[in-house]
Structures are given as C-alpha cells and as structure tokens.
C-alpha cells in the first residue's frame, strides 16, 4: 500500500505554515503537470490530497463523479459540480474549465489551513455556491496577511484574474518562501556579529541577580 489513509485535514490546524510546501509547491506542481497533459481535476479539496508514506502529498481522485447524501460535501457529475466549498465560479455556471479552475479550488485549501475556517460556507450547498459567485474575497488575519495577494490571485472570481497556470503560482510561492527565509536570517544577523568575548559579557550580565541591576 503506497498511501496512508489520511488526507490533508489533520495537517490543517489554524495558523500553521506547512501549506507553503504542501499546497503551494508540491500540489501546485502536480496540477501543472496534469494541466500540461490536458487534465482538469475538477474537485480539489482536502479529502483529495493524500500523503505517501514518505510524507509527500499527492492529489487523488481525478475525475471522481459521485453524489453523497450530505449536501455539505456534495459532489455531482464531475463536469459541473465539485465539492461546493471548493467550487470555482465558472464550474458553478457550467462554463468551460481549464487549469485555472483547479487553482481556485487549491486556493481555498490554504485559506482554510491558515484560518481554521472556509472562506465561503452557506447554510446549504446552494448558498455556498452563490457565495463563490458573489461574495468578496475574505481577508486573511494579520499574522498571515502577507499571503493575501497570493490568495487573491488564486481565488479571483474571473479566471482571467488568476495565475495563468499552476507553474506561475508555484514560482510566486517560492518567492514568498525565500523572502520569509531572508527576513528571518536578517533578523538574527546582528546576533552573529557578536564575538565570543561579547557573548561572555552578555552571559555574565544576564546571570547577575536582579537586585544587582540597581547597584
């Protein structure tokens, strides 16, 4: 057996960052590959992102077309509808689909991973679909707001306003990751400039009793 019986949901704790690797790069790369083969998944959602035993996430259930009893997880004919929470506006309107529709569904996943909630969730499947068509793109909370522009390029209402292809999105995600790494490095650069003697002085100072600071 190649895959664990686990989808991405257990990895989707609010505020976590593994989505940069899991969703932005790995799954994005897979979607770009299948797009170049002329395939549109049509039903990207957490339950369709499985994990290999080595930890590699892989999209699954290409072309699945089933109907389930619970309309909160409704999947219909595979041509018109996917799961309502991750449905692109053009898919909801039975318009022609391309890889940008999958990018929309993929964009919903990191929003849920970063915030712990779905961006569009109505009282019924139809209410949720209408929200995809009409509701504004929600804002990410301040701690993860640096991803807002990326999110908006993934779940724009019009396909023309999204990334042209998953490869373009992956490149942008890698830029953001490199930028975050550079910021983290620069934030500690001043610490690396201390000499061993300087660290000895600092260590001696912080080890003094608190009362000594006033003497």
Image (cartoon, rainbow, N blue to C red):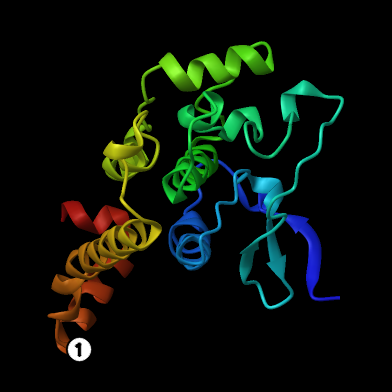
Identify the residue shown where x is 27% and y is 37%: 161
Please give left or right for residue 23 compared with residue 63 in the image: left
Identify the residue shown where x is 35% and y is 37%: 159
Please give left or right for residue 160 compared with residue 214 in the image: right
Question: Does dot 1 land on a helix, a strand or a loop?
Answer: helix
Relative height, residue 97 to residue 117 (above, below): below
Tag 1 residue? 196
Identify the residue shown where x is 37% and y is 28%: 157
Q: Nearer the viewer, residue 89 or 190?
A: 89
Task: Return the x and y of residue 80 as percentages of the image width and height.
Answer: 62, 32
Task: Return the x and y of residue 188 as percentages of the image width and height.
Answer: 22, 69
Q: Nearer the viewer, residue 99 or 135?
A: 99
Relative height, residue 205 to residue 198 (above, below): above
Q: Quadrant of residue 1?
A: bottom right
At label 1, counting other C-alpha atoms closer than 10 Å, the crowd grade (few under 14, some 14-19, many 20 or more) is few
Residue pushed farthest bottom? 196
Relative height, residue 9 to residue 3 (above, below): above
Task: Return the x and y of residue 182 as percentages of the image width and height.
Answer: 21, 68
Please give left or right for residue 130 compared with residue 138 in the image: right
Q: How many marks?
A: 1
Task: Return the x and y of residue 95 as percentages of the image width and height.
Answer: 49, 31
Relative height, residue 173 to residue 103 (above, below): below
Identify the residue shown where x is 62% and y is 65%: 57
> Which quadrant of the rendered structure holds the C terminus?
bottom left
Q: Nearer the viewer, residue 73 or 179?
A: 73
């Amino acid at each position: 057996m190649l895959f664990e019986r686990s989808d991405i949901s257990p990895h989707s704790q609010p505020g976590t960052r593994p989505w940069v690797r899991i969703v932005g790069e790995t799954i994005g790369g897979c979607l770009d590959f299948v797009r170049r083969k002329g395939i549109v998944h049509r039903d990207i959602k957490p339950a369709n992102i499985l994990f290999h035993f080595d930890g590699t996430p892989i999209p699954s259930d290409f072309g699945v077309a089933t109907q389930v009893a619970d309309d909160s997880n409704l999947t219909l004919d595979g041509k018109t509808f996917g799961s309502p929470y991750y449905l692109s506006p053009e898919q909801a309107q039975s318009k022609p689909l391309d890889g940008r529709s999958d990018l929309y569904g993929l964009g919903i996943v990191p929003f849920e991973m970063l915030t712990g909630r779905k961006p569009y969730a109505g009282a019924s499947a139809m209410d949720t679909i209408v929200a995809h068509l009409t509701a504004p793109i929600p804002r990410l909370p301040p701690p993860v707001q640096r991803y807002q522009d990326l999110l908006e390029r993934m779940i724009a209402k019009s396909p023309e306003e999204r990334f042209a292809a998953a490869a373009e999105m992956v490149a942008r995600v890698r830029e953001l990751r490199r930028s975050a790494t550079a910021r983290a490095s620069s934030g500690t650069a001043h610490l690396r400039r201390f000499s061993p003697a300087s660290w000895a002085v600092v260590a001696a100072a912080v080890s003094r009793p608190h009362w000594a600071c006033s003497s």
